[in-house]
Image: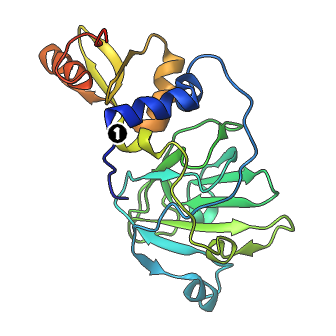
Amino acid sequence: MARKNISRRAFLHTTAAAGTAAVIGLGTATPAQAAAGFYNPFTGYAVSDGWAEHIARGSLGGIDYVMSVGTRLPAAGGGVVTNIPFNGTGGHTVSIQHDDGYRTQYMHLSQFLLGNGARVNAGDVVGLSGGAAGAPGSGSSTGPHCHWHMINPSGVRVNPLDYISDGGGPPPFDIWRDNMKLIQSTNRGIALVGPGYFRPLRSDEEVHAAVALVGNPVVGNDRQFDLWRSIAYDGQVKPPTA
């Protein structure tokens, strides 16, 4: 996915309109809204095996997207997560039960990131890809990739690209994955930082929520931590007063 450039003013307007705590899953929980639709989170990856190829060799169907081990896997739509470890030939599998009765499933994961029953929105990261031959959780995979398919309310596996007829669009709050990161040093602790934004994380719950959203922290020394913080405020160590 191409990185997006966004002005500091636009960033602050977006986060203010959305509600920062609700966006990153920190602070008081808010009721999740039903998903308005789906999008294809893998448009930037090459397909090694399409739906027809899966059916031709006796599979129930799926699409294989080539990606390196550890690639973050975004939810195609809002729903509730179930992790299925060592799911036969599929290996570690994340299943998302969506609000309209459909499910999407991601197979051959190297790591689960959320607990069973976690509520996600479109674009939230649900796990890390795997597929390396013989690695734990790879199932029958012979090379790094993510297998993706959809299951309709009747329990029949269907091609998600037929369901997502328009190819989909970018997920909500894409700015957080593209522009935010976690930083950490020995004496400064851990913080979420981005354009015009800096927030120290005070609890394990906050850290876990942030890791699920933007990935593992960048670890450096205290001087580097202070530099990252100052960059967030356009060269100022503290937030601007005006």
Q: Is residue 170 visible?
A: yes
Question: In the drawing, does residue 188 fall left or right of residue 221?
Answer: right
Task: Decide if residue 89 is in sight here.
Answer: no
Residue at far right of view:
154
User: Which residue: 69% across, 78% down?
Assistant: 60
Q: Toward the viewer: 76 or 170?
A: 170
In the structure shown, which secondary structural element does the residue marked by tag 1 occupy? helix
Total count of labels: 1
- The x, y position of residue 161, in whole percent, is 61, 75
Circle 1 is placed at which residue position? 179
Expressed as whole percent of the image width and height from the top left, the position of residue 65 reads 45, 70
Please identify the residue farthest to the front as the structure is shown: 242
Q: Is residue 128 left or right of residue 88?
A: left
Q: Quadrant of residue 34?
A: top right
Give the crowd class for mark 1: few <14, some 14-19, many >=20 residues within 10 Å.
some
Residue 93 at what x, y percent from top left?
60, 55
Q: Residue furthest left?
A: 223
Is 121 left or right of 128, judged from the image as shown?
A: right
Is residue 128 shown left or right of residue 222?
A: right
When the figure is inspected, residue 171 is found, relative to residue 179, above or below; the finding is below
Residue 78 higher or lower than 134, as above or below: above
Q: Quadrant of the N terminus?
A: bottom left
* Residue appearing at x 66%, y 76% in the figure: 159
Q: Residue at the location (61% across, 92% down)? A: 56
- Which quadrant holds the C terminus? top left
Q: Position of residue 154 (x, y in %)?
A: 87, 68
Residue at 20% x, 19% y is 230
Amino acid, disc 1: Asn
* Scheme by which the image is coloured: rainbow
